[in-house]
Amino acid sequence: MSSHPLRRVFTRRFTVLFAVPALLIAGAVALLPGTAAEAAGTTPSTQTAARPPAGHHPPIPAQGIFFVKGKVAHPARLTVADLARYPQYTQHVTFQSGTGPQTHTYTGAKLIDILTAAGPAFRADVKNDLLRYAVLVHASDGYEAVLSWPELVDGFGGTQALLASSEDGRSLATEGPRLTVPDDTKGGRYVSGLTSITLVRVGA
Ligand SMILES: Nc1nc2c(c(=O)[nH]1)N[C@H]1C(S)=C(S)[C@@H](COP(=O)(O)O)O[C@H]1N2
Ligand SMILES: [Mo]
């Protein structure tokens, strides 16, 4: 397998002049953050997903449907109209928001009544098991807030939190119910466009 001397020279020149620089450039490109790999579409998903715009007023696809789930005997799919089957309460409330204080009138059902009807699965073998639960409220824009269960119970927090079916006389049938937390001075837990309430056992 002897090759012609000229071919050996040519081969060596080719290696030095083209192959070596090409390898160096390729190596440098590969080390650059997010260029070649990104172009090839092989970047692991370090990019953050598109965020919803600031503020909320969620674009509601769900037509006021929401779920009652978690540690309950009877998980349910309800609509805003179903809230009328529970005792009705009206509240005049004020809360602080990014746009200043707001005052509204809400009508709806008590959050604790809806969860009680779903049958909280409190354990009988644990002293005051109810003190170990929380309610996670989820909205269509991904916004969430929790209330503790005892926060809702007379003699503990006793907060008269509602799932409101109307705000200032305007029906929330399309947008979905709004949580009220009348003892809160900040508006953060007035979750609008609510899509689920989940009873969670937080305790050990
Ligand atoms: N679904 C949902 N509800 C929400 C929010 C949100 O971002 N998404 N923001 C909360 C905050 S921080 C405040 S102060 C009030 C503002 O009420 P408004 O949207 O009626 O002005 O809504 C609360 N409810
Ligand atoms: Mo807020």
Image (cartoon, helix red, strand yellow):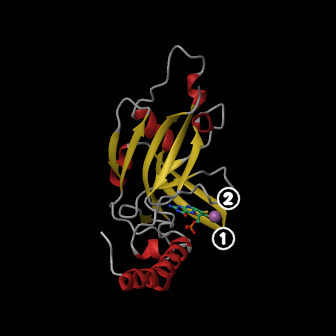
The quadrant in which residue 10 appears is bottom left
* Residue farthest left in this picture: 1
The quadrant in which residue 158 appears is top right
Which residue is labeled 1 in the image? 98
Q: Amino acid at mark 1?
A: Gly
Residue 176 bears which disc, if any?
none
Q: x, y percentage for residue 180?
A: 55, 53
Q: x, y percentage for residue 86?
A: 40, 42
Q: Is residue 59 above or below residue 13?
A: above
Q: Is residue 48 above or below residue 128?
A: below
Residue 186 bears which disc, if any?
2
Mark 2 neighbour density, 10 Å: few (under 14) some (14–19) many (20 or more): some
Q: Quadrant of the N terminus?
A: bottom left
Judge by depth and name the residue closer to the eye, 96 or 54.
54
The reply to whether dot 1 and dot 2 touch (C-beta < 8 Å) is no
For image coordinates 52% across by 41% down, the residue present is: 135
For image coordinates 57% across by 46% down, the residue present is: 146
Whether disc 1's CB lies below 8 Å from ligand 2 is answered yes
Q: Quadrant of ligand 1?
A: bottom right
Judge by depth and name the residue closer to the eye, 126 or 113.
126
Whether disc 2's CB lies below 8 Å from ligand 2 is answered yes
Q: x, y percentage for residue 132?
A: 59, 29
Choose the circle earlier in sequence order: 1 or 2.
Answer: 1
Q: Is residue 34 above or below residue 196?
A: below
Mark 1 neighbour density, 10 Å: few (under 14) some (14–19) many (20 or more): few
Of helix, strand and loop, which one carries label 1? Answer: loop
